Image (spheres, rainbow, N blue to C red):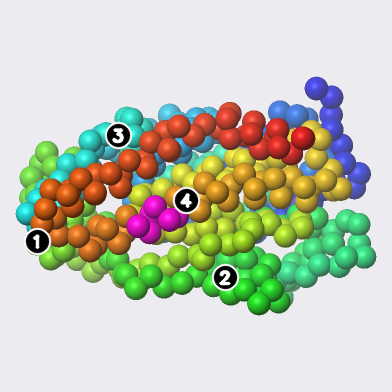
Amino acid sequence: MGTTALDPPLKIAQIGAGLGGLAFTLSLLDQIKRHSTSGIELVVYEGAKAFGEVGAAVGMGANAREVLRHLGLDDEYVAISTPGLSLEFHWATSDFPRVICPDIDGSEKSASHRGHLLGILVEKVPENLVQFSKRLVSHSIDPTKSSLAITLTFADGTTDCCDVLIGADGINSATRDRMFDGTGISMKPVYTGTDVTRCLVPIGTIAAIIGDEPSKHPQIYLGDNKQLHAVDAPSRWPLYEVPDLPYFNCGHIVLLGDAAHGFLPTLGAGAGVAFEDGVVLAALLGHPSITRYNVAQALQTYSDCRMGRTTYIKRVSREEHHHRNGIHFKANADLVKFRESLEVLPLFKEWTVAGATAEAIGAFLK
């Protein structure tokens, strides 16, 4: 295929370089290389001073592994991750204190440290592509300009301009706040009334409490279990949700990942769904037919393709959260209901990069 050029180049500003953001970054760079596109300029702004190993475990399903294979990173991921073929739930007060959920999502479920996962993505990011200590404060649009109509203002007082703004800036997204400013709709994250404690514990410490074999597999403890007191200096994290947005884009501005649909971590699906967002959005923006005149249509297509799936997963995550934290398993019917609630998991196995991107591109070109 010949070189595709835009004159002047289409400048894309990406706010945020977390997991979903970097999945978009690497996917778009791959698209640009594949289609020999010379008319797209990508700039990535990150509020942190550097990439860091912040966070604890990240659960990964079949959909996330699909994206890692697509990015050529599956071998690297296997080296830093731990597979989990089944989940064990433990309730302190229950007629069924130990519930084993079988491997209903295939053998793809696994987990890794967030920092290690971020690290294998960072390794593929070109040097100097990401500008650090750039926290977005606001953006404005000049409707009289045909290019570089979006002006970005950062906390350090600097500004920049772009044609397309990608908000991958997390659950407290400044991009989202500004996008809905003036609409009368509050899209601030909502506290769910639940806090969690997180920490990293040496595997030997856990094995001494629950046994060597159980320590090798995912274990989930709820209620006043003695296992929950076996950690030192845990950090406390309040859980928030982003309200269901009416749209993920407005003109040349678009959201992905937690900025678009931040939901509860009950299913361990947040990173995988953000990965999905990234590759679908990159397939559209990196398509050879993209121009500054149809880019808003491409972003609308992304929004249309992603909203239904992400809203459904968010709702199931919320329902499962309430179910796990409110149930005591006093009857077999409760156990059946709990197992049924996990039947949503195969929808991650059924998702493919090829299928999702083909659907989006087909809708865009229709």
Q: Secondary structure at mark 1?
A: loop
* First along the sequence among labels 2 and 4: 2
Residue contact at pointers 2 and 1, CB within 8 angstroms: no
- Return the disc, 4 or 1, that comes first in the chain's sequence: 1
Q: Amino acid at mark 4?
A: Tyr
Which residue position is annotated with label 3?
A: 104
**Distance from Cα at disc 2 to Cα at disc 1:** 37 Å
Please name which of the two marks, 4 or 1, marks the residue nearer to the observer.
Answer: 4
Q: Residue at x 41, y 48 (%)?
A: 269
Above or below, 115 relative to 65? below
Amino acid at the residue labelled 3: Ile
Q: Quadrant of the C terminus?
A: top right
- The quarter of the picture where residue 187 lies is bottom right
Give the magenta-colored segment's residue range. Answer: 314-319
The disc at residue 187 is 2
Number of residues whose C-alpha sits closer than 10 Å to that of mark 3, classed few (under 14), some (14–19) or many (20 or more): some
Q: Is residue 306 left or right of residue 14?
A: left
Q: Are marks 4 and 1 in contact (CB under 8 Å)?
A: no
Tag 2: residue type? Met
Is residue 316 one of those drawn in magenta?
yes
Q: Is residue 347 above or below residue 269?
A: above
**Mark 1 Cα within 10 Å, few/some/many (few <14, many 20+)?**
some
Q: Is residue 327 left or right of residue 131?
A: left
